[in-house]
Amino acid sequence: MGKGKQQRKLTFKEAVEATPDVASGYQEGINAFGKYADKIIVPDPDKIDGSLDIDETTLKLYPDDNRWDYALCYDSEVFYIEVHSAITSEVSKMVKKLQWLKIWLATKAPEINKLTTKTKQPFYWVQSSKCDIPKHMPQYKTVVQNKILPMPVWDYNIICKKKK
């Protein structure tokens, strides 16, 4: 690269394709979410820059790891969404999934990581059904500390209103 030239920021699709672990996993819109597509709510669907099923795409590479589910690029920012049972007994697994994701992004997916939202919370636990993590339980404190308190749907309008 010549002097004085700034490197162009990759699109989400280019970042996924530049990541060997998931190079073939890019999906248009929210297609990567499959049966969970109804868990994603955005004000302007045209701003969805694509999605990635991290879990399925990396299954053969990391079969025994607690892999995170999805990446979603909305309005040029990437968010990470795990659709999972929101019950007390699953909290430790969710924390492991979050730790795995952070390490994977830093070591195996740096181009995707560069697109991670800097203005909002990037990691979300979307409950696959009702939430049963009582506030008096230590697991509730764990999800709050890890900033992954389960939510019924990933609603961009609500996320934008949250102060993190």
Image (spheres, rainbow, N blue to C red):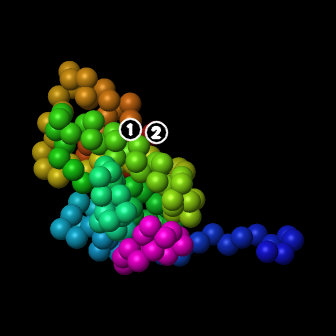
Magenta residues span 15-28
The quadrant in which the N terminus is found is bottom right
- What's the residue type where badge 1 is placed? Lys
Badge 2 local density, few (<14 within 10 Å), some, or many (20+)? few
Q: Is residue 16 left or right of residue 130?
A: right
Q: SS for tag 2? A: loop
Q: Which numbered dot is residue 164?
A: 2
Whole-number angstrom distance, CA of label 1 to CA of label 2:
9 Å
Q: SS for tag 1? A: loop
Q: Is residue 40 left or right of residue 111?
A: left
- What's the residue type where badge 2 is placed? Lys
Quadrant of residue 147 in the image? top left
Q: Which numbered dot is residue 147?
A: 1
Q: Percent from the top left, x then y, of residue 90? A: 21, 39
- Disc 1 vs disc 2: Cβ atoms closer than 8 Å? yes
Which one is earlier in the sequence, the residue at label 1 or at label 2? 1
What residue is rendered at 30% in x and 39% in y?
149
Q: Is residue 43 left or right of residue 34?
A: right
Q: Percent from the top left, x then y, of residue 158? A: 34, 50
Q: Is residue 87 above or below residue 10?
A: above
Q: Which numbered dot is residue 32?
A: none
Residue 156 in sight here: no
Q: Percent from the top left, x then y, of residue 93? A: 27, 41
